[in-house]
Image (cartoon, helix red, strand yellow):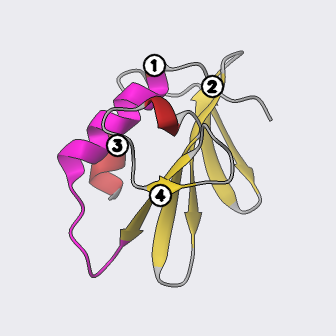
Amino acid sequence: MKKAAKKAAKKKPSRKAVKWNSPFYGFENEGWFASFHCYTKYIQVAFFRGAALKPTPPGQSKHKDVRYLDVRADEPLDEGQFVKWMKQASKRPGMRM
C-alpha cells in the first residue's frame, strides 16, 4: 500500500493535514482529494470526488460524491487500479472542509 501510494499522484500534493486521526491529501487552494483512515482490520481510503472516477471505487457513502476503497491485509490490493484512482482524484476539483 505504501509503495502504491508513493507513486499514485502525478504531482506531489502540496497540502497535507491530519484531521480526525486521518491523513488528508490535497493541493493549495484546491481542496482535498483523498484521505486514509486506519481501522483495526483495514485501511479505508476516501476519494472525495470518487463518484466521478472510472471505474468507480466500490464503497458507497451517504455523500453522493464520496466513494471508498477498503484495503485489507488479507486481501490483495490491485495496485495498478489504486494508482489510477489516485491520479484521477488528484486531477479533479478538491473538496473544501
The residues tagged by marks 4 and 3 sit, at their Cα atoms, a distance apart of 22 Å
In front of the other: label 2 or label 4?
Answer: 4
Check disc 3 and give the amino acid type. Answer: Lys
Left or right of 65 on screen, residue 10: left
Decide: is 79 above or below 7: below
CA gap, disc 2 and disc 4? 19 Å
Above or below 83: residue 4: below
Q: Secondary structure at mark 3?
A: helix
The amino acid marked with disc number 4 is: Gly
Mark 2 and mark 1 residues within 8 Å of each other at the beta carbon: no
Magenta stretch bounds: 72-90
Q: Is residue 55 above or below residue 18?
A: above
Q: Earlier in the sequence, mark 2 or mark 4?
A: 4
User: Which residue in the protein does label 3 denote?
Assistant: 6
Q: Which residue is pictured at 53% across the width and 55% down the height?
A: 60
Lateral position of residue 16 relative to residue 73, left or right: right
Crowd band around label 4 with a 10 angstrom C-alpha radius: few (<14), some (14–19), many (20+): some
